[in-house]
Image (spheres, rainbow, N blue to C red):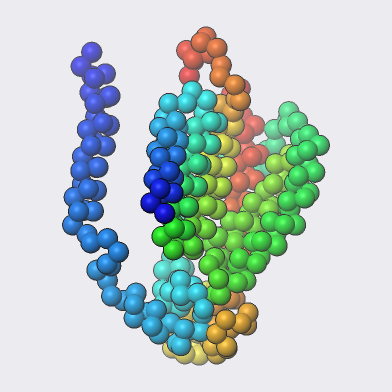
């Protein structure tokens, strides 16, 4: 149990740092979603399945979809990292 | 440059202070021993007084029903504000490319499954973990996936608005009926039934159905508007 929680917290911290450092915005959104999924798993381990379902549906699913759609609206929906010349106008 | 250094150091200072605050609070609180004792009282009597096998639903809809109404109002206000900001509906991208075969087939495959899962979670909210909010989000996902797969499909904002308004009105009407019948707003009516069966806990399943339909329609409208309102975005 302790090692499972430790692994989940490590994965969550790693993806939270990845969300800050990733140059690809879509990848950053995906790693934020991973953090929410880890929180949902921790809620399950703490025997709060109702909160876990809300976190998985709203935090990991709907929130990430909303962020991704906002990226598309801003024209930042790109799957591969752009060249250096493109960074100037951001 | 000192200002640039300040902008990088500021968030770090804030994060360190926040972590210190959280650590102080966590050190003061005994873990696993809640300071409130009302939870144990509710656990002891919720099954007998409300008839819901899921205590969380008993709290959300019976003991704190008016808080749930406030939550619905906040969600409504947020969705309305987002709709105002995102502009007029129906402005579709001119260059909305049709999705590929895999996405379209996957959407057709997922739609009935998501619908069944969402309705199951809503209708069993008083028996098992879950309820109107969680199931409503899954219903919204069920209705948004086909729109993502087929961007050219005409939006159905009018029908969604009807569902949303009627569900919200049904929630308030149930509360008012309880006020007229039992002199308590949102008090559970219709008897308790046998604990653990699908038809039990009085009006709680009906209230959760209203919540689920309202949340689902609201979020579907918001997400569809989000997909279609990107016509004027710079590329």
Which residue: 52% across, 9% down? A85
Residue B124 spot, x, y in % from top left = 60, 72
Q: Position of residue B76 (x, y in %)?
A: 51, 57
Foreground of the two, B22 or B156: B22
Q: Is residue B128 above or below residue B157?
A: below
Q: How many marks?
A: 0
**Front-most of residues A54 and B216:** A54
The reply to whether residue B49 is visible in this rendering is: yes
- Work out whether residue B153 or residue B2 is closer to the camera in this orientation and state it: B2
Classify residue B161 as left or right of residue B111. Answer: left
Residue under the image location 56 percent in, 16 percent down: A82
Q: Quadrant of residue A1?
A: bottom left
Percent across and percent down for residue A88 are 47, 12
Q: Nearer the viewer, residue B131 or A13?
A: A13
Q: Is residue B65 visible?
A: no
Residue B43 left/right relative to B2: right
Q: Residue at x 50, y 41 (%)?
A: A34
Quadrant of the frame with the C terminus of chain B: top right
B3 above or below B88?
above
């Amino acid at each position: 149990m302790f090692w499972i929680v430790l692994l989940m917290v490590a994965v969550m911290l790693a993806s939270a740092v990845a969300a800050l450092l990733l140059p690809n915005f879509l990848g950053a959104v995906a790693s934020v979603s991973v953090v929410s999924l880890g929180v949902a798993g921790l809620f399950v381990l703490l025997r709060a399945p109702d909160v876990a379902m809300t976190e998985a549906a709203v935090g990991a699913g709907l929130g990430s979809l909303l962020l991704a759609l906002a990226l598309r609206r801003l024209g930042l929906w790109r799957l591969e990292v752009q060249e250096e010349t493109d960074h100037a106008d951001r | 440059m000192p200002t640039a250094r300040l902008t990088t150091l500021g968030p770090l200072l804030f994060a360190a202070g926040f972590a210190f605050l959280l650590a102080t609070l966590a050190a003061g609180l005994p873990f696993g021993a809640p300071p409130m004792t009302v939870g144990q009282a509710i656990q002891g009597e919720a099954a007998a007084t409300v008839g819901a096998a899921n205590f969380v639903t008993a709290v959300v809809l019976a003991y704190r029903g008016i808080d749930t109404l406030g939550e619905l109002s906040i969600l409504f206000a947020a969705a309305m504000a987002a709709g105002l900001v995102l502009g007029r509906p129906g402005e579709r991208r001119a260059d909305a490319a049709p999705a590929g075969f895999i996405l379209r087939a996957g959407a057709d495959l997922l739609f009935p499954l998501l619908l069944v899962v969402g309705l199951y979670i809503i209708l069993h909210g008083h028996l098992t973990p879950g309820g109107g909010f969680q199931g409503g989000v899954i219903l919204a996902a069920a209705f948004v996936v086909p729109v993502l797969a087929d961007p050219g499909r005409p939006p159905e904002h009018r029908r969604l608005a009807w569902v949303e308004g009627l569900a919200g009105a049904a929630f308030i009407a149930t509360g008012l009926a309880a006020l007229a019948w039992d002199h308590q707003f949102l008090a559970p009516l219709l008897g308790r039934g046998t604990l653990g069966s699908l038809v039990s806990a009085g009006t709680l399943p009906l209230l959760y159905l209203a919540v689920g339909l309202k949340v689902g329609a609201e979020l579907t409208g918001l997400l569809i508007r989000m997909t279609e309102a990107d016509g004027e975005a710079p590329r």
